[in-house]
Image (cartoon, grey):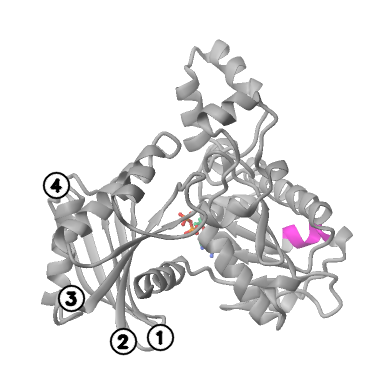
């Protein structure tokens, strides 16, 4: 059995899962939050045979930086008897948000790879610098353990220029690589492949649309196993409205509001990222559960917040239907896609024109991987829990073995 550490480092957080391979079973998982503060929180759980989690430690402590967090984590893995020795960890796989045009697949980390990720910090200023800190922190403490990087953008690199280019001056693409990249690729890749397995067909013979609906949300059109289009853009701000992000808007809004409210472009983009979507429309929250509760109280703005998102999702699905020449399967995944029956029902109702028919009972009671469309539906609709860490562990194993 090999043990792979799957890591997702954010600017002040670090999430990890220790995965047994090739069994693909979780051994332990945890999170550091508020790294860089006196009251950082470290939590680590053991994952039991039945999948339940047993909390081994939850502590508030001062943690200066990611390197210190990684040292604490590795010490505790031994102290808490999760591993006997650190050399049992055969590889560390890191999730990286932006791989630009450099990476169409995962890569073994070396100096050149790190330089490329560094050069993409402009495109993902909140994420890539944090990932680099995470990678270097593990390399410092485990210098002999290979690291692998797995990119959110890589799966989308198969799009053709007609799907990824913006109709902007071509020089902006030549000089700055301004184009659509797409994100959540690891999730779209995983659930599209699972859908083919559940549907008992080769993914190469299918047209699939995957809906990753979490706090961040994106859609992906997967034809014959390859991404042909996706909703997010140069950054994760594009596409459909989300918890706090606007999704696509008329770009002229930026100058208009800049004049009216005396704000800079940077300040406005910050509001498009953090103060829009569910939060902006409802004025209450970025959480879909709060929107659903608001609707029950008769709050029209909560209803509008969800309706705006569902309409845009249906619009994208319609456009993918045309672009791919049909759709065989639609998949719901991530926090909202996996949990909100109302969201799934409302979107499926909008798709009735494409011959989508819901199996109401299956939708209401779905647990884990579930077919929620009726037998005579033109398009099969599944709920499939996403599993990005398993994809990270798989790629890490493959690259290390090579
Ligand atoms: P991210 O990883 O992008 O932060 P998640 O995939 O965890 O997000 O999804 C978070 C979203 O999932 C939140 O909007 C939350 O309200 C929603 N969610 C979680 N559970 C439920 C539920 N039972 N019903 C409706 N929405 C849910």
Q: Which residue does the numbered mark 1 point to in the structure image?
A: 23
Q: Secondary structure at mark 3?
A: helix
Is residue 196 in sight in this rendering? yes
Q: Is residue 143 left or right of residue 186?
A: left
Q: Which residue does the numbered mark 3 point to in the structure image?
A: 87
Q: Can you say which quadrant of the picture contains the N terminus?
A: bottom left
Determine contact: label 1, label 2, CB under 8 Å.
yes
Q: Position of residue 103 (x, y in %)?
A: 48, 52
Of tags 1 and 4, which is closer to the observer? 1
Q: Position of residue 380 (x, y in %)?
A: 76, 73
Determine contact: label 4, label 3, CB under 8 Å.
no
Q: Earlier in the sequence, mark 1 or mark 2?
A: 2
Does residue 112 show up magenta in the picture?
A: no
Q: Is residue 198 left or right of residue 1?
A: right
Q: Is residue 380 left or right of residue 44?
A: right
Which residue: 75% across, 70% down? 206
Q: Earlier in the sequence, mark 4 or mark 3?
A: 4
Of tags 1 and 3, which is closer to the observer? 3
Q: Earlier in the sequence, mark 2 or mark 4?
A: 2
Q: Which residue does the numbered mark 4 point to in the structure image?
A: 64
């Amino acid at each position: 059995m090999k043990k792979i550490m799957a890591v997702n480092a954010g600017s002040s957080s670090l999430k990890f899962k220790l995965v047994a391979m090739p069994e693909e079973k979780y051994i332990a998982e945890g999170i550091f939050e508020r790294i860089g503060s006196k009251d950082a929180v470290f939590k680590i759980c053991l994952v039991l045979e039945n999948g339940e989690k047993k909390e081994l430690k939850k502590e508030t402590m001062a943690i200066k930086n990611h390197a210190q967090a990684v040292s604490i984590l590795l010490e505790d893995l031994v102290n808490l008897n999760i591993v006997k020795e650190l050399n049992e960890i055969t590889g560390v796989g890191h999730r990286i948000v932006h791989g630009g045009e450099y990476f169409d697949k995962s890569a073994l980390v070396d100096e050149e790879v790190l330089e490329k990720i560094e050069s993409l910090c402009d495109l993902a200023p909140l994420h890539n610098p944090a990932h680099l800190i995470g990678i270097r922190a593990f390399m410092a403490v485990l210098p002999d353990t290979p690291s692998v990087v797995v990119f959110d953008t890589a799966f989308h690199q198969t799009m053709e220029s007609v799907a990824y280019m913006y109709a902007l001056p071509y020089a902006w693409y030549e000089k700055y690589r301004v184009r659509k990249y797409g994100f959540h690729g690891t999730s779209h890749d995983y659930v599209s492949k699972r859908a083919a397995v559940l549907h008992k067909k080769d993914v190469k013979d299918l047209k699939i649309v995957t809906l990753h609906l979490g706090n961040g949300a994106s859609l992906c059109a997967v034809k014959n196993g390859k991404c042909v289009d996706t909703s997010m853009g140069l950054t994760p701000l594009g596409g459909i409205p989300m918890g706090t992000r606007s999704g696509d808007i008329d770009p002229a809004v930026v100058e208009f509001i800049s004049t009216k409210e005396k704000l800079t472009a940077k300040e406005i983009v910050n509001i498009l990222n953090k103060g829009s979507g569910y939060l902006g429309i409802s004025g209450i929250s970025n959480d879909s559960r709060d929107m659903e509760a608001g609707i029950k109280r008769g709050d029209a703005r909560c209803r509008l917040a969800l309706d705006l998102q569902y309409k845009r999702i249906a619009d994208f699905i319609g456009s993918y239907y045309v672009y791919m020449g049909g759709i065989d399967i639609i998949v719901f995944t991530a926090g909202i896609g996996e949990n909100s029956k109302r969201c799934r029902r409302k979107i499926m109702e909008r798709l009735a024109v494409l011959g989508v028919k819901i199996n109401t009972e299956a939708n209401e009671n779905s647990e884990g991987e579930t077919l929620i469309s009726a037998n005579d539906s033109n398009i099969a609709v599944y709920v499939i829990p996403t599993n990005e860490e398993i994809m990270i562990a798989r790629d890490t194993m493959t690259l290390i073995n090579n």
